[in-house]
Image (cartoon, rainbow, N blue to C red):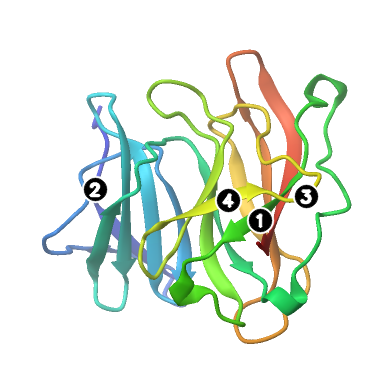
Amino acid sequence: MQGPLSDVWVYSPKQQRWTSLAPGAPQPPPREMAAAAMVGPARLLVHGGRRGDGSVLDDAWLFDAKEGKWIQQASTGRPRCAHAAGLMWVPPPVAAAGPHDGKGTTDQADAACDASAAAVQLPESEAAADAVPLLVLHGGFSGAAVESSTFAIDPSSLATVALAPGAGQQLRTCERFAHCGAAVPAGAAAGKGGPQQHLVVFGGVNPASDLGDAIVFSLRRR
């Protein structure tokens, strides 16, 4: 059985065909259980994953499908594998949304897993009036423990961006890994940029049980 891979494939819906690419150096080391999301029309941001020797990675890599190569890499200091990611837009200050009104749907066993609103501290270079995209990552396994934390990566610089609970909210949920997540529209944001979004996370596993809950994260600026 083959171990973790580092190959890159592109699918064409029009041609209904997969094409194998052969990016030159530098390239990410082989990995499994990484988290990734599209952060542009032809750009894929990959974070973390696990090597064949069991060590968990903390690196972020940006792949440009138009150029057919990896164009940027950085260490985040947040080793994770089997985590979830979604591209979210931080709304402009004038359109900052409050906490999501509806908390994540949970069953009684998972009642402690709540929805959260995060306040984002943007770098000065990006503290403008327009909406700002961030790759938001949640949960996973760090190599030492199953995590419940949420953090973000700036797609333009690959810098880690601080998240903090909004007023009256919490940012931590039940520890989980091997869950799924997706960013979903939550209404239009004023100013330039994409729509305001929520990150919806579903299910996963932790040392105590299999999870069947859904939790919702929203973002606003500090």
Find residue 210 and name its label: none
Q: Earlier in the sequence, mark 2 or mark 4?
A: 2
Q: In which quadrant is the C terminus drawn?
A: bottom right
Q: Secondary structure at mark 2?
A: loop
Q: Is residue 188 visible?
A: no
Instruction: Check the image and report above or below for 151 versus 88.
Output: above
Q: To which residue does mark 2 refer?
A: 6
Residue 133: % across, % down: 54, 69
Q: Label 1 is placed on what type of residue?
A: Ala
Pointer 4 local density, CA inside 10 Å: few below 14, some 14–19, many at least 20: many
* Of the image marks 2 and 3, the number of the one nearer the N terminus: 2
Percent of width and height locating residue 159: 38, 59
For disc 3, the marked residue is 167
Q: Which mark is residue 119?
A: 1
Whether label 3 touches label 1, CB < 8 Å: no
Give whichever of 122, 158 is nearer the camera: 122
Residue 139 seen in this snapshot: yes
